Image: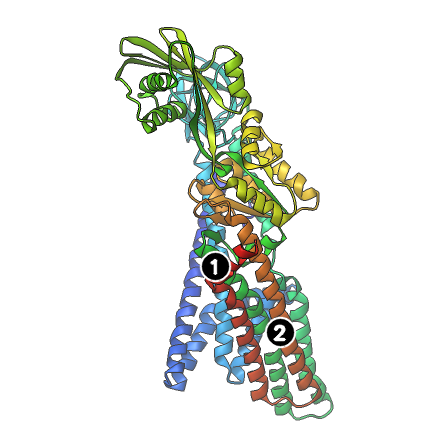
């Protein structure tokens, strides 16, 4: 099942989410029940228990795990098509008819489990869409025609309404500040690591968080067309497109299913037309169905991919489906988000420059003392830097915070202020040119020094970028909502030359589509809500596990559980190795099928030999695929790199 509604209406989306959750729970329960019945039947069978008992358990497994596939197959048949669901049911019933009920039950369990996993992932995506809608507040305070304040449903806001947003509240709509000023945390939309000061005339977005000031915002966009609403639509539409991706073997299932059914009918009908015996014709047809059944083909594909997924999971990369595991091999360009992905997402003091009469330690200690009461990320970074260096920070009094400007406090009888530069200057311009945020420290209104802060890059990012460029054969790309200066500085430290900055979520999607339009298979790595549409639009989306938002984690196809970017190149290589094993397995399974089918058609294939050959091919391809479960598979992969 896939999400089909692209409406931005919360009510419609919530109904769809509830229905998706119920379907997912039901499918998981059926799959678990089928697996339990199969396990019980196998235990009785292997222990030499009564034949009637393990047959009964296996048949219950057929019914519980196969009814949905049978229904889907009949629906496809009603639409004059054949699919692998129907072929699987027919093959399972054929196996039971000639005594090989274990094979059929195993096939039933494989398909039931696969359907349950797909349903669970669909439910999680739907849940994440609803959580995104919850970012926008339910109500908004607006100024009435009488000048009084009224509270209304945020969904009823109209263009031109003036909304009053107080400290700590989320903005109810996209618009323009018409009165007041405040630091606003826009990380959910733009990915900026530091709150941006917004004052009269500045654009603001729904779902962002107001800081310490009160602002009046004129609503400029209908609630159904805000950035948050557009993110919902983009994620849903991209998810629908991705749902059409299939495994390599599934792309030919229609032709294979039709061919096997037609051939089985022919194997039965042709001898009968020439006066053959009914029982021998039926036995030959059933033997043909068994040796041509997709068991070995399914196992040729799934075990290598599942084993690769398990190996990747043990090494910190969660791959959500076998389709994703297979698609990773095609990646030929990687696009990174900046804040929280190639950087840590928090500012850090990088440089302290003192002016006459002060030392760098004095400047940092005084600034830290003044910022002790601040909750702004810049202030927290300055205090942390002073503490890490073991500097003594005197107790501050008379603390004042001015949104968009800075802080002011009395420290040891002197008035200390830490603020944005009112104007440039050689030192300030030099620090800014290096991609840092500059703040000026004043003592009794005299400049005492300048502190430069930077968003720290991850320690493994340069090596990780170099490795993905080697594996993909193309330069990595940086796509970020942050400003050009900060973006280029972070990119330079990571070794990325292609930088695309100041992008809103829809701009990131456009950048991804442009890369895909050039014929490339794009992998996007991100962590924030604003990255979710790009993660969904990419051929493969990868979220950062520790810092990732719920929406990014659920939208992504894979998750870096430990935020280790170095694992990206390794998992792409692992996918390519798994694909090579899949091709080898398909060759093995195909060879067995061709030989056994030819034997059955040209000569007389004894049923025991047919079953033994079929089972041998199944065991061989399963064991070959399971080689990727070994820890050596990941280590060998690293050694090859």
Mark 1 = which residue?
Answer: 311
Is 121 located above or below residue 336 in the figure? below
201 to the left or right of 395:
right
In this orientation, which residue lies closer to the viewer: 392 or 423?
A: 392
Is 384 located above or below residue 247 in the figure? above
The residue at the point 52 percent across, 55 percent down is: 638
Q: Could you say which quadrant of the image residue 408 lies in? A: top left
Is 58 located above or below residue 275 in the figure? above
446 to the left or right of 287:
left
The residue at the point 38 percent across, 75 percent down is: 40
The residue at the point 38 percent across, 9 percent down is: 357
Instruction: Tell me the distance, in whole angstroms, between the alpha carbons under discs 1 and 2.
Output: 24 Å
Residue 228 place in picture, x, y as percent: 51, 33
> Could you tell me how many numbered marks the image carries?
2
Is residue 13 something one can see in this rendering? yes
Label 2 SS:
helix
Quick one: label 1 or label 2, which is nearer the N terminus?
A: 1
79 to the left or right of 199:
right
The residue at the point 47 percent across, 51 percent down is: 123
Residue 42 place in picture, x, y as percent: 41, 77
Label disc, if present, on residue 588 of the rendered structure: 2
């Amino acid at each position: 099942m896939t999400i089909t509604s692209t409406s931005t209406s919360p009510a419609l989306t919530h109904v769809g989410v509830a229905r998706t959750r119920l379907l997912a729970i039901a499918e998981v329960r059926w799959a678990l029940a089928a697996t339990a019945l199969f396990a019980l039947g196998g235990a009785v069978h292997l222990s030499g228990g009564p034949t009637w008992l393990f047959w009964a358990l296996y048949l219950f497994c057929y019914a519980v795990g196969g009814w949905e596939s049978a229904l889907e197959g009949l629906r496809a048949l009603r639409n004059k098509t054949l699919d692998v669901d129907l072929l699987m049911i027919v093959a399972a019933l054929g196996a039971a008819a000639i005594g090989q009920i274990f094979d059929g039950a195993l096939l039933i369990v494989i398909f039931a489990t696969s359907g349950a996993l797909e349903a669970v992932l669909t439910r999680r995506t739907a849940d994440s869409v609803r959580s995104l809608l919850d970012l926008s507040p339910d109500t908004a305070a607006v100024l009435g025609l009488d000048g009084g304040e009224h509270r209304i449903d945020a969904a009823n806001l109209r263009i031109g309404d003036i909304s009053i947003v107080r400290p700590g509240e989320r903005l109810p709509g996209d618009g323009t500040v018409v009165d007041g000023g405040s630091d606003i945390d826009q990380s959910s939309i733009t990915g900026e690591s530091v709150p941006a000061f917004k004052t009269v005339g500045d654009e603001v977005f729904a779902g962002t968080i107001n800081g310490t000031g009160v602002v009046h915002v004129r609503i400029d966009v209908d609630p159904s067309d805000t950035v948050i609403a557009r993110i919902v639509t983009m994620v849903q539409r991209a998810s629908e497109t991705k749902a059409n991706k299939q495994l390599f073997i599934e792309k030919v299932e229609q032709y294979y299913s039709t061919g096997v059914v037609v051939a089985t009918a022919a194997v039965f009908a042709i001898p009968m037309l020439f006066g053959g015996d009914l029982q021998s014709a039926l036995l030959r047809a059933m033997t043909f169905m068994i040796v041509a059944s997709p068991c070995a083909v399914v196992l040729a594909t799934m075990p290598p991919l599942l084993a690769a997924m398990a190996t990747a999971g043990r090494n910190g990369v969660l791959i959500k489906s076998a389709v994703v595991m297979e698609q990773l091999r095609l990646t030929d360009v990687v696009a990174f988000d900046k804040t929280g992905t190639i950087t840590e997402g928090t500012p850090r003091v990088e440089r302290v420059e003192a002016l006459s009469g002060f030392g760098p330690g004095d400047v940092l200690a005084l600034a830290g003392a003044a910022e002790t009461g601040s909750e702004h990320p810049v202030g927290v970074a300055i205090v942390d830097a002073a503490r890490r260096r073991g500097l003594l920070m005197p107790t501050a009094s008379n603390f004042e915070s001015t949104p968009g400007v800075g802080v002011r406090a009395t420290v040891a009888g002197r008035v200390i202020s830490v603020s944005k530069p009112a104007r440039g200057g050689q030192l300030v311009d030099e620090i800014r040119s290096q991609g840092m945020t500059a703040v000026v420290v004043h003592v009794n209104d005299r400049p005492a020094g300048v502190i430069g802060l930077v968003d720290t890059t991850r320690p493994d990012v340069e090596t990780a970028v170099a490795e993905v460029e080697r594996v993909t054969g193309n330069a990595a790309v940086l796509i970020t909502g942050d400003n050009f200066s900060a973006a280029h500085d972070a990119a330079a430290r990571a070794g990325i030359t292609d930088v695309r900055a100041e992008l809103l979520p829809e701009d990131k999607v456009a950048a991804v589509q442009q890369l895909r339009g050039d014929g490339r298979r794009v992998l996007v790595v991100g962590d924030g809500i604003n990255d979710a549409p790009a993660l969904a639009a990419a051929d493969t989306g990868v979220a950062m596990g520790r810092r990732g938002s719920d929406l990014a984690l659920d939208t992504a196809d894979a998750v870096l559980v430990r935020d280790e970017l170095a694992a990206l190149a390794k998992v792409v290589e692992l996918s390519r190795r798994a694909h090579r094993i899949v091709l080898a397995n398909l060759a093995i399974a195909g060879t067995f099928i061709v030989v056994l089918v030819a034997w059955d058609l040209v000569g007389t294939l004894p049923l025991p030999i047919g079953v033994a050959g079929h089972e041998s091919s199944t065991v061989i391809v399963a064991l070959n695929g399971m080689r990727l479960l070994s820890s050596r598979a990941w280590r060998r992969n690293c050694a090859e790199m």
